[in-house]
Amino acid sequence: YLKFNSYSSELILEKDFNNKDIKSFDIISDSSDISIKKSDSSVISVKVYGDKNNEVSAIVKNNTLYINNYE
């Protein structure tokens, strides 16, 4: 029989950024659902859900928001 590892989907990163600092996105993810929604807020809120064993980072550099979610 086949046995699958159970996948947990929990909040593993929550971070806010000033939208005036961001002009583009660069997202690297091995498996995720990604949504980008328009808002009138001056804040870009990043929430990453996934396996707590995955490493994830979100930083702004040179007006680009880099999100990296990997095993």
Image (tube, helix red, strand yellow):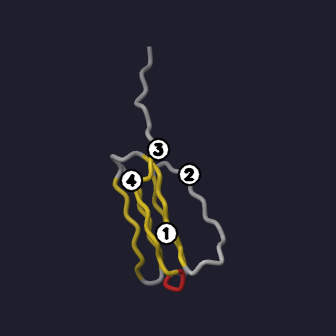
Q: Position of residue 9 (x, y in %)?
A: 47, 44
Camera-near label (2 vs 4) is 2
Residue type indicated by callout 3: Ser
Camera-near label (1 vs 3) is 3
Residue at mark 4 = 70
| Position of residue 37 in the picture relative to residue 28 (left or right) | right
Q: Which of 22 and 13 is in front in this view?
A: 13
Residue type indicated by callout 4: Tyr
Q: Where is residue 27 in the image (x, y as percent from the top left)?
A: 49, 64
Q: Is mark 4 on a helix, strand or loop?
A: strand
Residue visible at 43% across and 68% down in the picture:
15
Q: Where is residue 18 in the image (x, y as percent from the top left)?
A: 49, 81
Q: Counting other residues with Cα less than 10 Å from the Cα at mark 2, is it few (<14), some (14-19), or many (20 or more)?
A: few
Q: In this view, does 9 lie above or below 17?
A: above
Of the numbered discs 2 and 3, the one sitting upstream in the chain is 3
Q: How far apart are marks 4 and 1 (CA)?
A: 14 Å
Q: Distance between the residues labelled 4 and 3?
A: 14 Å
Q: Where is residue 25 in the image (x, y as percent from the top left)?
A: 52, 72
Q: Which of 53 and 10 is in front in this view?
A: 10
Q: Is mark 3 on a helix, strand or loop?
A: loop
Residue type indicated by callout 1: Asp
Residue at mark 3 = 9
Image quadrant of residue 69? bottom left
Camera-near label (4 vs 3) is 3
Q: Do the residues labelled 2 and 1 touch (CB within 8 Å)?
A: no
Residue at mark 2 = 33
Residue at mark 1 = 26
Residue type indicated by callout 2: Asp
